[in-house]
């Protein structure tokens, strides 16, 4: 009952002022005094609660330090009130975290690094102005260094499984140098050399003590804020139903060690269209897949019944249940 009352009050706060003006508009013109009174009484904005403890990969952030706490506060404000972005992050995470999590675990990378991918790319195959690509935002040279194929026909930076494996290898290499996962995250953003030089110049071994460019200075705090909101969405006003989240779509894997001169024909042979083939295999960058000696490619073919909404609803025990409802905890 408490949750229902809280939700009702929230909805009234959001829609109350609109109702006042709609109703008033039917009777008489709203004057300035009435408008201001209705606005003050009906529309309220609250600063989000900042946790007393926060950690990345079990490394605690020193939130007892005033400036550290203020930096985290900024990111909570951004992620709490930039609703469209945060809602999309939560929805996409439901589809892609189950893919990323076991790969991190297999490679002994802390689970919190899934939030690094979340803020890097929004779990979309974006390309940065500098050319960083995919969920993990690899530059071409770094991608090749860590075993990804990048050419006109194949770009494995767009392959979530392979790029996550490559990211794990990179993260392990950097951790061997710093022995701190928080510094590893910072180096992922700024580059290993820049972090190493900053640590030496500033005589510290702690991310939270470093003076850095604004993007890197905000980086770990962005991770901490989105991690906290994702794990406690209702505490920050995000009431998403289980049925609102983007579901995992099961796929059949076709192993190919031969040339495919026409991917459109390949798609038709497997009873899907070219658009769906590309959607599920964005690493296929042209209309063909030339064979490469000694290499087998794994092409995803989605199970067609799962491309329809009704099929996914059957897998949800309670579609109306609120995702990660932690308001009473």
Image (cartoon, rainbow, N blue to C red):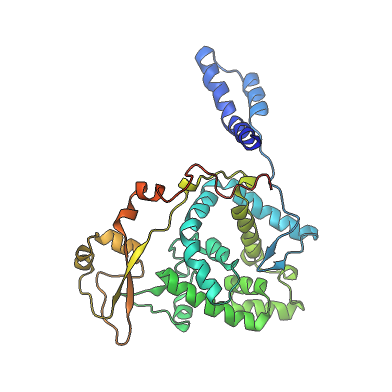
Between residues 229 and 153, which one lies in front from this camera angle? 229
Give the residue drawn at x 53%, y 75%: 106
Q: In what quadrant of the picture does the N terminus appear?
A: top right
Q: Is residue 193 above or below residue 237?
A: below
Write down the quadrant of residue 327 in the picture: top right
State the count of labels: 0
> Extreme top residue here?
27
Expressed as whole percent of the image width and height from the top left, the position of residue 65 reads 80, 61
Q: Is residue 231 visible?
A: yes
Which residue occupies 60% across, 80% down?
174
Q: Residue 169: where, in percent of width, then height?
A: 53, 80
Position of 201 relative to 243 (above/below): below
What residue occupies the far front of the structure in this picture? 317
Displayed quadrant of residue 188: bottom right
Vertical placement of 18 versus 76: above or below? Answer: above
Query: Residue 159, position in %: x, y?
Result: 40, 70
x and y percentages locating residue 2 in the rendered image: 66, 36
Residue at 23% x, 78% y: name it. 259
Describe residue 318's horizontal placement relative to residue 186 as left or right. Answer: left
Residue at 79% over, 58% down: 66
Q: Is residue 214 visible?
A: no
């Amino acid at each position: 009952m408490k949750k229902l009352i809280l939700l009702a009050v929230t909805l009234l706060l959001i829609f109350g002022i609109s109702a006042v003006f709609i109703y008033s508009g039917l009777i008489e013109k709203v004057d300035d005094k009435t408008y201001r009174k209705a606005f003050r009484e009906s529309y309220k904005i609250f600063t989000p609660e900042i946790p007393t403890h926060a950690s990345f990969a079990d490394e605690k952030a020193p939130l007892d330090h005033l400036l550290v706490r203020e930096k985290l506060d900024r990111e909570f404000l951004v992620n709490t009130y930039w609703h469209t972005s945060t809602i999309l992050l939560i929805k996409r995470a439901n589809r892609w975290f189950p893919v990323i999590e076991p790969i991190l675990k297999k490679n002994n990378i802390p689970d919190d690094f899934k939030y690094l991918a979340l803020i890097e790319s929004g779990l979309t195959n974006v390309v940065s102005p500098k050319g960083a690509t995919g969920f993990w935002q690899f530059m071409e040279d770094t991608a090749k260094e860590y075993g990804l194929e990048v050419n006109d026909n194949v770009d494995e930076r767009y392959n979530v499984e392979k790029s996550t494996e490559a990211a794990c290898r990179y993260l392990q290499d950097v951790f061997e140098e710093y022995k701190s996962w928080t510094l590893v995250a910072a180096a992922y953003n700024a580059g290993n050399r820049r972090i190493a030089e900053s640590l030496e110049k500033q005589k510290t071994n702690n991310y939270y003590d470093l003076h850095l460019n604004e993007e890197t200075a905000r980086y770990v705090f962005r991770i901490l804020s989105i991690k906290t909101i994702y794990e406690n969405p209702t505490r920050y006003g995000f009431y998403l139903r289980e049925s609102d989240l983007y579901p995992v779509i099961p796929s059949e894997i076709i192993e190919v060690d031969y040339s495919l001169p026409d991917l459109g024909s390949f798609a038709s042979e497997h009873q899907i269209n070219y658009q769906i083939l590309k959607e599920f295999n964005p690493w296929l960058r042209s209309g063909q897949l030339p064979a490469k000696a000694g290499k087998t490619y794994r092409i995803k073919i989605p199970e067609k019944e799962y491309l329809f909404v009704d099929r996914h609803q059957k897998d949800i025990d309670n579609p109306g249940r609120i995702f990660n409802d932690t308001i009473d905890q």
